[in-house]
Image (spheres, rainbow, N blue to C red):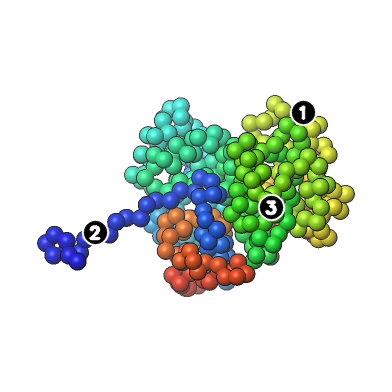
């Protein structure tokens, strides 16, 4: 069929996708991203260049500082052939010197994708709603989807069928706990969340946990760890909670992931922590540095998982067809567009 002047009709542009919460994905997309991350990690380890985002630019807005988020996104864009721009709090004054709407509209004229790491989740959601380019949630006080994507990739490298796992989260019912509840819905694994009374996940996520037949909340960490394949913990005092530090250390004392507590989990259960860790508080040195710890693998995998995420947002065809993203083991076929483009 021809349009005006004998020309073919224009193809409607794809609607832009954002990554504000982990539940932005469907299960097939999750496994497609994990397989793509594995492919990119393999290419990097073998010295194969993959400049799939040559000429693309990422704007990184930081209202909360971070070692892993900045380095992994900036390095990832460089390895993909693109460029990343760091924008600290004093450079924008988001919501103070400049309205979120104005920042979103301006950045959309210059860059191809935006990442924001901030406090209020509404700031990230507003930015995504107003921006004409994809927006990535690098962390908010509500959820931390980039961290969970890397965590799930770390597990996927060892257990291709995530649904077979029993995972225990021990600690504060803050943004990481909320996102693990999302992950359990998406991947289908068994989740136990253990936190002190009064520190439960945000009500919306607590309701989702209670509706999930394979998830439960407990105030006893030993119950959560019983026969667990994976034990996950996070800081008791997050950024913005410093005034509560003394009270929190008292309330969380029995939730420390120690060698004694780990005896309730399966022998050799993996230990995970998103970092930074407060050694001697939520986790002991002998555990975080022990043979079951995959903490450094998690940190490394922020790079590979986020590279896959950037490709999904900017070149979604690289993810392959969702219905072929996963076979019966949860493993994915290599995306057909990912071809070797030379050696370093």
- For image coordinates 67% across by 31% down, the residue present is 241
Horizontal placement of 312 versus 102: left or right?
A: right
Residue 287 in picture, x, y percent from top left: 81, 52
Q: Is residue 328 above or below residue 100?
A: below
Q: Is residue 307 above or below residue 241?
A: below
- For image coordinates 69% across by 52% down, the residue present is 214
Residue 78 in picture, x, y percent from top left: 49, 57
Q: Is residue 325 above or below residue 290?
A: below
Element marked by disc 2: loop
Point out the frontmost of discs 3 and 1. 3
Horizontal placement of 205 versus 232: left or right?
A: left
**Is residue 179 something that shows in the picture?**
yes
**Is residue 157 something that shows in the picture?**
no
Give 297 or 27, whichever is nearer the viewer. 27
Residue picked out by circle 1? 247
Horizontal placement of 190 versus 27: left or right?
A: right
Report crowding for label 2: few under 14, some 14 to 19, many 20 or more residues within 10 A (C-alpha). Answer: few
Element marked by disc 3: loop
Sequence-wise first label, 3 or 2: 2
Q: CA distance from mark 2 to mark 1?
A: 61 Å
Sequence-wise first label, 2 or 1: 2
**Numbered circle sitting on residue 10:** 2
**Numbered circle sitting on residue 214:** 3
Q: CA distance from mark 3 to mark 1?
A: 32 Å
- For image coordinates 77% across by 28% down, the residue present is 247
């Amino acid at each position: 069929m021809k349009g005006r002047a004998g020309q073919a009709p224009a193809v409607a542009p794809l609607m832009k996708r954002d990554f504000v919460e982990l539940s932005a994905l469907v299960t097939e997309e999750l496994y497609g991203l994990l397989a793509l991350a594995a492919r990119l990690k393999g290419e990097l380890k073998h010295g194969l260049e993959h400049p799939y985002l040559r000429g693309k630019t990422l704007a990184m807005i930081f209202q909360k500082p971070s070692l892993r988020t900045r380095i992994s996104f900036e390095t990832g864009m460089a390895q993909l052939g693109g460029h990343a721009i760091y924008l600290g709090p004093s450079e924008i004054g988001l919501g103070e010197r400049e309205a979120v709407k104005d920042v979103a509209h301006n950045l959309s004229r210059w860059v191809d994708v935006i990442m924001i790491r901030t406090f209020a989740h509404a700031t990230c959601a507003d930015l995504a709603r107003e921006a004409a380019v994809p927006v990535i949630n690098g962390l908010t006080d509500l959820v931390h989807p980039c961290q969970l994507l890397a965590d799930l990739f770390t597990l996927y490298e060892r257990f291709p069928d995530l649904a077979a796992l029993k995972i225990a989260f021990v600690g504060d019912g803050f943004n990481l706990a909320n996102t693990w509840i999302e992950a359990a819905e998406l991947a289908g694994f068994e989740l136990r969340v253990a936190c002190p009374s009064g520190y439960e996940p945000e009500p919306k996520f607590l309701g989702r946990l209670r509706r999930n037949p394979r998830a439960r909340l407990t105030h006893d960490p030993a119950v959560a760890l019983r026969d667990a394949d994976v034990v996950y913990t996070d800081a008791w005092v997050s950024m913005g909670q410093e005034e509560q530090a003394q009270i929190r250390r008292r309330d969380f004392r029995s939730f420390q992931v120690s060698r004694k507590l780990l005896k309730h989990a399966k022998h050799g259960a993996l230990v995970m922590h998103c970092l930074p860790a407060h050694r001697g508080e939520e986790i002991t040195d002998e555990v975080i540095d022990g043979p079951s710890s995959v903490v450094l693998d998690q940190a490394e995998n922020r790079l590979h998982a986020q590279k896959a995420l950037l490709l999904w947002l900017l070149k979604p065809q690289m993810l392959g067809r969702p219905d072929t993203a996963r076979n019966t083991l949860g493993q994915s076929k290599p995306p057909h567009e990912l071809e070797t483009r030379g050696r370093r």
